[in-house]
Image (cartoon, rainbow, N blue to C red):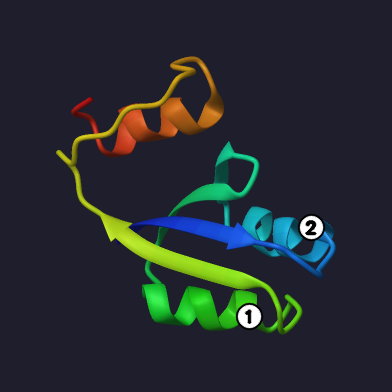
């Protein structure tokens, strides 16, 4: 399984199709346009799939993080922070 961080700059697209795709994969929102996902899919596949639902002027970035990676978030009680605590651990 991969732990992915997904960022989206939606300059022309409505957020609904992107949010729908991410939620259908079980992604958890950390910030308005930053999502966390545990998946067997690779980063390139996830980026490509999201690019199918965004407009040409939008940007999508996907990268992997590993258990033990250092992270920090301002809200420790948010679903995204709880995901990080359970999947990644170290803070």
38 and 63: which is toward the camera:
63
| On-image quarter of the C terminus | top left
| Side of 41 where 57 appears, left or right | right
Instruction: Note whether 1 is above or below 71 in the view shown.
Output: below
Q: Which residue is pictured at 55% across the width and 69% down the height?
A: 60
| Side of 22 where 3 appears, left or right | left
Q: Quadrant of residue 78?
A: top right
Who comes first in sequence, dot 2 or dot 1? Answer: 2
Residue 15, numbered label = 2
Q: Which residue is pictured at 75% across the width and 65% down the height?
A: 11
Q: Which residue is pictured at 74% across the width and 77% down the height?
A: 53
Residue 6: x and y in percent read: 49, 58
* Label 1: element kind: helix
| On-image quarter of the N terminus | bottom left
Q: Which residue is pictured at 73% across the width and 75% down the height?
A: 54
Q: Quadrant of residue 58?
A: bottom right
Instruction: Note whether 77 is above or below 53 in the view shown.
Output: above
Instruction: Note whether 87 is above or below 13 in the view shown.
Output: above
Residue 37, numbered label = none
| Side of 87 where 21 appears, left or right | right
Q: Quadrant of residue 62?
A: bottom left
Residue density around tag 1, few if under 14, some if 14–19, many if 20 or more, within 10 Å: some
Residue beneath label 1, please? Answer: 51
* Mark 2 vs mark 1, CA separation in Å: 13 Å
């Amino acid at each position: 399984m991969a732990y992915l961080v997904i960022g989206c700059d939606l300059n022309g697209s409505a957020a609904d199709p992107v949010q729908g795709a991410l939620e259908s994969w079980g992604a958890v929102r950390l910030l308005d346009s930053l999502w966390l996902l545990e998946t067997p899919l690779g980063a390139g596949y996830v980026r490509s799939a999201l690019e199918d639902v965004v407009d040409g002027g939008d940007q999508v970035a996907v990268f992997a993080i590993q258990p033990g990676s250092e992270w920090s978030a301002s809200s420790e009680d948010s679903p995204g922070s709880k995901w990080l605590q359970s999947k990644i651990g170290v803070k």
